[in-house]
Image (cartoon, helix red, strand yellow):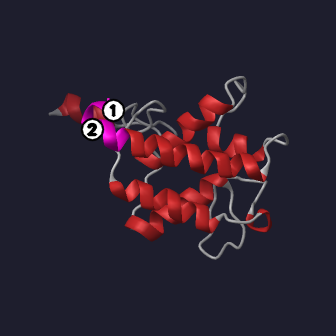
Amino acid sequence: MLPACLATQGTADQVAPTQDDSDVRPPATKADIAIVKQARKVLNSPLKWNRADNRICPADAKTFSLYCALEKATDEVIGNFEHRGAVMQEARFVVDEIAPNQVNYRHRLMDYNNDPTTTFADIQRVFRLLDARIRKRLADGPAASK
């Protein structure tokens, strides 16, 4: 019993690999499509775009980064935001795909959002590609989640 207890102890900044695996690919659901659709509504205008993301998403915000639009939409659709949920992870993979040379992105969604070369059209492209990826994963079935 003691070794199991010791294995779970650590400092506040330590996160178990299974809890914060940046390459984890949780199963996609139909709710994920609704989340992407809602995120596009949340961030449907350049005037609503927060170009200075810090990954802190106030409930009363009037502007939204890519990350915060996805967080807000997730809360609105399923009521339970997960930092490594399927939508958030697929969004990260989309950024990897469309900005492969940005090795300096420590936080992919935040840094892509804040990149001075990113445009509002780029953010909308992320939503389109994200929707397509999730739909493809659902069509391909459970094997696509591995």
- Is residue 123 visible in this depiction of the protein? yes
Residue type, label 2: Gly
CB of mark 2 within 8 Å of CB of mark 1? Answer: yes
Image coords of residue 48 (percent x, y): 74, 67
Image coords of residue 139 (percent x, y): 32, 41
Which disc, if any, is residue 54?
none
Position of the C terminus, as image quadrant, is top left
Local crowd size for mark 1, using a 10 Å CA cut-off: few (<14), some (14–19), many (≥20): some
Which disc, if any, is residue 141?
2
- Most distant residue in the right direction: 116
* Label 2, label 1: how far apart the Cα atoms are: 6 Å
Looking at the picture, tell me which residue is in the foreground, 142 or 5.
142
Q: Is residue 95 left or right of residue 1?
A: right
Secondary structure of the magenta portion, mostly? helix
Q: Is residue 128 left or right of residue 20?
A: right
Residue type, label 1: Ala
Q: Residue at x 40, y 40 (%)?
A: 136
In the rendered structure, does residue 55 fall within the stretch colored magenta? Answer: no
Q: Residue at x 49, y 33 (%)?
A: 22
Query: Please, what secondary structure does the residue beneath circle 2 have?
Result: loop
- Most distant residue in the bottom direction: 60
**Quarter residue 140 falls in:** top left
User: Which residue range is magenta in the image?
Assistant: 137-146
Q: Is residue 59 above or below residue 23?
A: below
Query: Please, what secondary structure does the residue beneath circle 1 have?
Result: helix
**Quarter residue 44 falls in:** bottom right
Q: Is residue 68 left or right of residue 11?
A: right
Residue identified by numbered label 1: 144
Q: Residue at x 70, y 52 (%)?
A: 54
Image coords of residue 11 (percent x, y): 47, 39
Local crowd size for mark 2, using a 10 Å CA cut-off: few (<14), some (14–19), many (≥20): few
Image coords of residue 104 (percent x, y): 73, 27
